[in-house]
Image: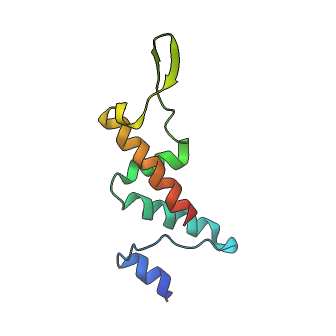
């Protein structure tokens, strides 16, 4: 028999990620993976969790080395940076 939480996940309720219960870690991990994959750019969010966040590109300007600002990132880099933030927020929730 399904619990209410399992029913909500199966029926598509995605208002917040599942809670961690120590004795059900493997089940929780799988549910979190499914939850992340069902978000926009879900695969990138999950990869951010598994492999770490984007390493921001460095540029040299007038002999000074600095990281790029968000506005200077390419479209793909912006999506990855946003996915990193989403991954962090999901885990912190």
Front one among 42 and 53: 53
Q: In the image shown, does 30 or 56 lie closer to the viewer?
A: 56
Residue 13 location (% of width, % of height): 38, 77
Position of 62 relative to 35 (above/below): above
What sort of colour scheme is used for the picture?
rainbow
Q: Quadrant of residue 8?
A: bottom left
In the rendered image, the quadrant that contains the C terminus is bottom right
- The answer to which of 53 and 36 lies nearer the viewer is 53
Viewer-side residue, 72 vs 50: 72
Answer with the quarter of the image where residue 29 lies: bottom right
- The residue sitting at the front extreme is 62
- Number of numbered markers: 0
Q: Using the image, determine if residue 19 lies above or below residue 2.
A: above
**Residue at the outermost left position:** 75
* Residue visible at 57% across and 68% down in the picture: 28
> At x 48% / y 87%, what residue is drawn?
4
Please state the horizontal and vertical placement of residue 78, each as a whole percent of the image.
36, 40
> Residue sitting at 38 percent across and 36 percent down?
77
Residue 15, by quadrant, is bottom left
Q: Position of residue 85 (x, y in %)?
A: 47, 51
* Side of 16 where 72 appears, left or right: left
Q: Residue at x 36, y 60 (%)?
A: 39
**Residue 27 image position (x, y, % from top left):** 57, 69
């Amino acid at each position: 028999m399904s619990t209410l939480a399992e029913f909500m996940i199966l029926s598509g309720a995605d208002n917040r990620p599942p809670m961690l219960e120590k004795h059900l870690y493997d089940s929780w991990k799988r549910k979190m993976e499914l939850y992340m994959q069902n978000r926009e750019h879900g695969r990138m969010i999950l990869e951010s969790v598994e492999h770490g966040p984007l390493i921001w590109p460095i540029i040299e300007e007038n002999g000074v080395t600095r990281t790029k600002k968000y506005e200077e990132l390419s479209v793909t880099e912006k999506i990855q940076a946003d996915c990193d933030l989403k991954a962090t927020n999901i885990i912190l929730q």
